[in-house]
Amino acid sequence: MPRTRCGGDPRAPGVGSGSACSAGAGPRARVRRRARAQTRGELRRQRRSGRRCSRCKRNWSDLVIYQNSLKQTLVTSPDTFPTPSGKVSLRVWECKQVSKEASKKGLEDLAALCALLAAQGRPAGCVPCTMDSPGYNCFVDKDKMDAAIQDLGPKELSCTELQELKQLARQGYWARSYALRGKVYQRLIRDIPCRTVTPDASVYSDIVSKIVGKHSSSSLPLPEFVDNTQVPSYCLNTRGESAVRKILLCIANQFPDISFCPALPSVVALLLHYSIDEAECFEKACRILACNDPSKKLIDQSFLAFESSCMTFGDLVNKYCQAAHKLMVAVSEDVLQVYADWQRWLFGELPLNYFARVFDVFLVEGYKVLYRVALAILKFFHKVRAGQPLESDNVKQDIRTFVKDIAKTVSPEKLLEKAFAIRLFSRKEIQLLQMANEKALKQKGITVKQKRQFVHLAVHAENFHSEIVSVKEMRDIWSWVPERFALCQPLLLFSSLQHGYSLTRFYFQCEGHEPTLLLIKTTQKEVRKAQREPGVLAYAELWGVCSPAASTQASCASGHSAKPALHREVCGAYLSTDWSERNKFGGKLGFFGTGECFVFRLQPEVQRYEWVVIKHPELTKPVSLETTTAASPHCHSMSSDPADRLSPFLAARHFNLPSKTESMFMAGGNDCLIVGGGGGQALYIDGDLNRGRTGHCDTFNNQPLCSENFLIAAVEAWAFQDPDTQ
C-alpha cells in the first residue's frame, strides 16, 4: 500500500502536533517491528553474501519514511547496505555533527531495515546500485566507460590550495581515476556558495515519485527549458538515460525560475556517471544552479543570459580568431547564427573524455574556461578545414560533425593546451562585455526566445546607399561590429557630398551618437594636382569601408572622371565613444574612447588593427575596482546617472598601462581630428576635410592605412539605428 504522511513538518513526517502517528504507531515503529520479525539467520546470510538490495519504489518509500521520522541529521545512502565486514556506508547531512548515540542507533535501525528488505527479496530486473572503486555505478555501461576513460590514475587528492588545484585540473590529475574524479566533483560542488534554501538529496526522494508518476522510463518528457536538446548518453546505459530525464523533471519542479538552459542535460548526464545515486546527482546539479556568488557565473538559466553569452562569444571570436571569423563570414549566410551554437559544441557534441576534462577545469575556474575551449575548437576547425571544401552547405552542421569526431584531429590535452594559450580579457572585462550585451538585448526587448535577425537584413540593399562602399562591403564590415550592435541598421550621419567639407559640421552631425564609423576615400597626389575639389571624410558611428565601384561613383558625383590609372585607397575607423566627449577638455585637444576602437584599411587590401593590448595583454594587467573609481573624470561616461550606463567595456582605467600612448584612441579639436596616438597618428584629418596623413601609432600598433600623406576624395560617418525605433 502507498505510504501516507502525517501532519506537521513536511521534512519530518510523523512528527507533528495533532498527528495520528504516535511514538508507538509511527512509520519508524512499524519498520522496526517488521524488522524484529525477521530471523537472525536471515540477517547473517545477508551479511555473509554481501548482497545489496537495489532501489525499488516500495523499498525506497520505506527507507525515506524511516529517515524522515528520525529527528537526527544522519542520512544514509539507500543503495548501500551491510557488507561482509558488517560496515555500512554513511554520509553526514549538510556537514552537521551526529552524536555517537544517534550514529549507533541509526546503524542498528538501518541493519534491521536491511534485513527486512533482504527478506523481501530483490525485485526482478533490479541491478545493485553501488560505486565501490574500481567498479562503476549502476547507471554506467562498463564497456563504454572502459573504452572512453581508463581507470589508471591516482586514488587520493590531498591538495587544498586553489592555485594548486587549478594546475592539477588543467593537467588532468584526476582525469584517469573514476573514483577520484567522483570525490573531487563532490568536494568542489560542495564548496560552491549557494542560496540558503537549496534542494538536496532528501528533497529528491520526497518528490521523484510524485513527479515521475506512472510514466514509463522511455516516455518521460523533458522540461521546456532544455529547448528540445537531446540528452547525451555518453557512457550511460538505458537506466542512466531514464534517470537523467527524472532528475531534469525534478529540477524543473524545484527551479521554476529557469526559463532556458539547454546545457543542463549534458551537465546532469556527466554528473550521473560520478554519483552514487540519482538523489546525489540531483543535489550536485542543484548546487551548481543555485550558486549565488555574483563573481562566479556557472550555467546560463534564461534566454537573455544565453543570448548575451552567444554575443560575447562572437565578440571574442572577432578579436581572437580573426582567420576563423573571416572563414565563417565567407561561408555562412549569418555568422551570428553559427556562433549561437557555441554552447552545443561543448554541452552535447564533445565526447565524454573531452567534456569531462573541460568540466574538471570549469568547476575550478568558472565560465571563462568555456569561452577558451570553444575558441580553441574554432581555431582547430579553421586549421583543418581551411582551403578544403565544406562537407555540407551548412557550416553549423560541419562544425558539429567536427566536434563529434574531434578525436581524429586533436587530443584532450592539446585542446586544453590551445585553449589556455589564448590570452583572453580578464574576468572583469568579459563580465562588462556580457553586461553590455544583456543591456542591448533588453533595450531591444529580446528577453525570451526568438529568432535572431540575420546580418544581411540589417543592411537592406534597397535602403542602403554609400558613395564609398557597396552593400556587400558594408555587410562584410557589419560582421566586424560588436555583437550588441549587429542587429542595428546603418544610419548615414555625415556625407561630404551632402554636408560640405567642414569639420565643425561633421561634429554637429555626429554628436549624440555612439559608437560611430568613420570612412575615408583618398586619391593619389599626382591626380590631385590635376585640379580636384576638397575631399570628404566619412565617419560612421559603427563601422566604415570603401569599394572601388563606390569610389568611381564618388568621383563621377564630384565631377571628376575615373581614369584607369587613378588609384584610390579606402580606410577608416570604428570609434566607440560619442564625439561630444571632446568638449570636456575645455577646447584643448584631449584623447578619449575605449579599447573597442580600431582602425582598418579596405583598399587596396583588407587589414584591421585593434587595440594593442588585445593582442599583447602582457603590456598591462587589470587594476582593482577601487582604482577604477578614482580614475580621472575625463574617462567616465557622459551620463550623470551611474545606473544609466554601464562601465565601458575595455575602458583604459581598468588597466595598468605603461604609458598614456597605449590609450590614445580618438581626439577632436576645431582644426583637426585624430584617431590613434603615440609615436604618430593612425589617422589625422585637417579642419577642411581636405588633407590627411597616416602612420604607425602605439595605440593600435598599425602600419600606415594608405599613402602617408593623402588628399581626401570622400568622407562618410555612419551610426547604428535600432530598427524598432526607425
Image (cartoon, grey):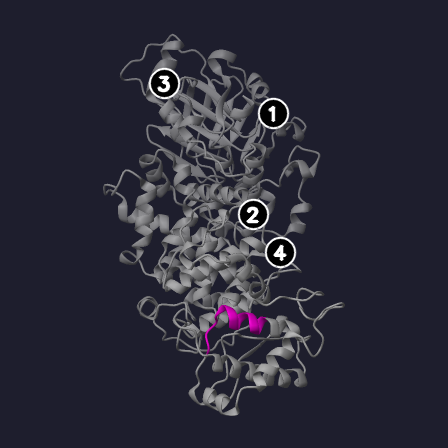
Please name whichever residue, 701 or 505, is drawn nearer the observer in this view of the structure: 505
Residue 385 belongs to magenta span? no
Which residue occupies the foreground of this view, 720 or 717? 720
Kindly identify which numbered label has been placed on residue 551.
3
Q: Distance between the residues labelled 2 and 3?
A: 41 Å
Q: Position of residue 252 (x, y in %)?
A: 54, 53
Calculate the distance from the C-alpha at mark 3 to the C-alpha at mark 1. Answer: 29 Å
Verify whether residue 60 appears in magenta: yes
Q: What is the three-letter code of the residue carrying label 3?
A: Ser
Asked if disc 1 and disc 4 are in contact, CB closer than 8 Å, the reply is: no
Residue 158: x and y, percent?
A: 51, 77
Task: Find disc 2 in the rendering and name its residue.
Answer: 431
Give percent across and percent down for residue 145.
35, 68
Q: Pointer 2 and pointer 3: residues touching (CB < 8 Å)?
A: no
Sequence-wise, the earlier of marks 4 and 2 is 4
Quarter of the image where one finds residue 269: bottom left
- The picture places residue 614, in percent across and down from the top left corner, at 47, 45
Mark 1 or 2, nearer chain start: 2
Is the Cβ of the residue at disc 4 closer than 8 Å to that at disc 3? no
Magenta-colored span: 53-64
